[in-house]
Amino acid sequence: MADATGGELLLDARLYHATAAEILAVIPTVVEDDAGTVMIVGHNPGLEELLAQLTGEWEPLPTAALAQIDLPITHWSELDSETRGALSGVWRPKEL
């Protein structure tokens, strides 16, 4: 389903309460390989675990928090449990 900006919105029930490993397994199967940016909306503890696994940094992600990770990949099919990126920002509602 396309959104108003021309991006694509994908709803995947596998992400509901998914673990970090499950999220990593889903992304390459549903995201176009050359997509520049992907936003994942889900629940904890899976999202906090994913953030820690991909960056080596532990950050609490309360409801409605956003985190941005820069990954050293050119195609989403390259994303796996060994991928390490850099945390470029965390935004929490109560801090804004």
Image: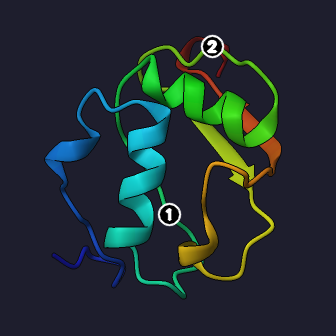
**Mark-to-mark CA distance, 1 and 2:** 20 Å
Q: Quadrant of the C terminus?
A: top right
Give 88 or 46, whichever is nearer the viewer.
46
- The local secondary structure at tag 2 comes to loop
Give 90 or 55, whichever is nearer the viewer.
55
Give 47 or 64, whichever is nearer the viewer.
47
Look at the image and name its color scheme: rainbow
Task: Choose top left, top right, bottom left or bottom right for residue 87.
Answer: top right
Residue designated by label 1 = 38
* Image coords of residue 55 (percent x, y): 78, 38
* Image coords of residue 69 (percent x, y): 71, 49
94 to the left or right of 46: right
53 to the left or right of 92: right
- Three-letter amino acid code of the residue under disc 1: Val
How crowded pointer 2 is (Cα within 10 Å; few <14, some 14-19, many 20+) is rated as: some
Instruction: Answer with mark 1 or mark 2, whichever residue precedes in sequence.
Output: 1
Residue occupying the point 23% across, 64% down? 10
Task: Choose top left, top right, bottom left or bottom right for residue 80.
Answer: bottom right
- The local secondary structure at tag 1 comes to loop
Residue occupying the point 67% across, 46% down? 68
- Three-letter amino acid code of the residue under disc 2: Pro
Q: Where 91 falls versus 86 (above or below)?
A: above
* Image coords of residue 86 (percent x, y): 84, 47
Residue 60 image label: 2
